[in-house]
Image (spheres, rainbow, N blue to C red):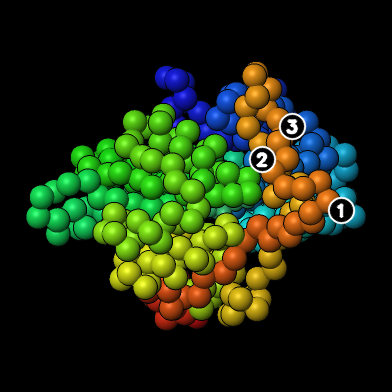
Amino acid sequence: MDVNGTPYRSIWLAEDGRQVEIIDQTRLPHEFSVVQLSSLDAAATAIRDMLVRGAPLIGATAAYGFCLGLHEGTDNHALEKIAQTLVDCRPTAVNLRWAVERMLRLLTPIAESLRVEKAYEAAAAICEEDVLTNAAIGQHGAALIKAILDKKEKKEPVNILTHCNAGWLATVDWGTALETIFRAHQDGVPVHVWVDETRPRNQGAHLTAWELVSAGIDHHLIVDNAGGHLMQHGQVDLCIVGTDRTAASGDVCNKIGTYLKALAAFDNQIPFYVALPGSTIDWQVTDGVGGIPIEERSQEEVLLVQGLHGDKVEGVHIAPKTTPALNPAFDVTPARLVTGLITERGVCAASSEGLLSLYPEKR
Ligand code: MRU
């Protein structure tokens, strides 16, 4: 992705070939700041404190975190410790476990002396695959957006509502849900995006809006509760969101508030699509509501709003100091509310049959 004329990914290997660099997403959109990760601990903190976030990027950071951890020890005990440290960082996005299990499967059977080199190769491969996967998701999703434009008599812009940030910052590059929009825009389809601010951490306001400004795409920021109203008044043609974990049944778990958008879309017969790479499918979970662990984050994220004050990013209290808060970070949208899943292999119904038709090797 282009940042003021410079191409960036959201994670990359530093020039020394050992450390890893990321963009500190807690500073955006006010400050573009690159941070070096030089240890397993630093990588784990970056995931836990959400300097990096978004399911695919969490997976990629975990893979590089594994590499960094190997500099502290390469025996089997070290592998287990690294894996546990990383998996414990955040519970919902399944890419974290997916990446850690992939590293373990690769490294456990090989000689200790080869582990560091092979780990770096594998982390780089995870990143490259993510980029290719997202490009394919973009193509399939852009075709859906184009099909909606084709049905419009006056060919006015396609209005797309999105929640949270499923753009290039949430992946290694391009994004999932947002890549469908970037791609449609590049293909000449007029688009306009309704960006849910996405309380409590405001990934929509901070990150999605920033990406859309950089890409020159027409958009408006809306409060989280505006979507239903806009849908009732014909101002939303379709919704596209990402997912942190997709159950084998097609239920999708995404940022808190996604479920309410899907309900409103269903009530207004508006297509509700979810874009995802195969790595976010948890084939072991068949019931999303009962089977996906929902991360509960700190009360502070709800009780304080973060923003730029002067030249500092600060939190401002918005509730009485003694009011407690509850902060579930994700919710599950049942498959019956999802029009379709946009994957790197094509678009399918949100159902086990739909998913298995694209991933027959999981039968
Ligand atoms: O808590 P976050 O910011 O990590 O949550 C991210 C999301 O919910 C995204 O929508 C999801 O990871 C899909 S990103 C391709």
Q: Position of residue 268 (x, y in %)?
A: 33, 69
Q: Position of residue 298 (x, y in %)?
A: 77, 51
Between marks 2 and 3, how big is the CA–CA gap?
Answer: 27 Å
Q: Amino acid at mark 3?
A: Leu
**Image quarter for residue 312?**
top right
Instruction: Name the residue carrying label 3.
Output: 37
- Mark in the foreground, 1 or 2: 2
**Image quarter for residue 21?**
top right
Give the numbered dot on residue 305. 2
In the image, the residue with mark 2 has its CB under 8 Å from the nearest atom of ligand 1: no
Q: Is residue 42 left or right of residue 229?
A: right
Query: Mark 2 or mark 3, which has the lower sequence index?
Result: 3
Between marks 1 and 2, how big is the CA–CA gap?
Answer: 35 Å
Q: Amino acid at mark 1?
A: Lys
Query: Mark 1 or mark 3, which has the lower sequence index?
Result: 3
Determine whether label 1 and label 3 are within 8 Å by CB.
Answer: no
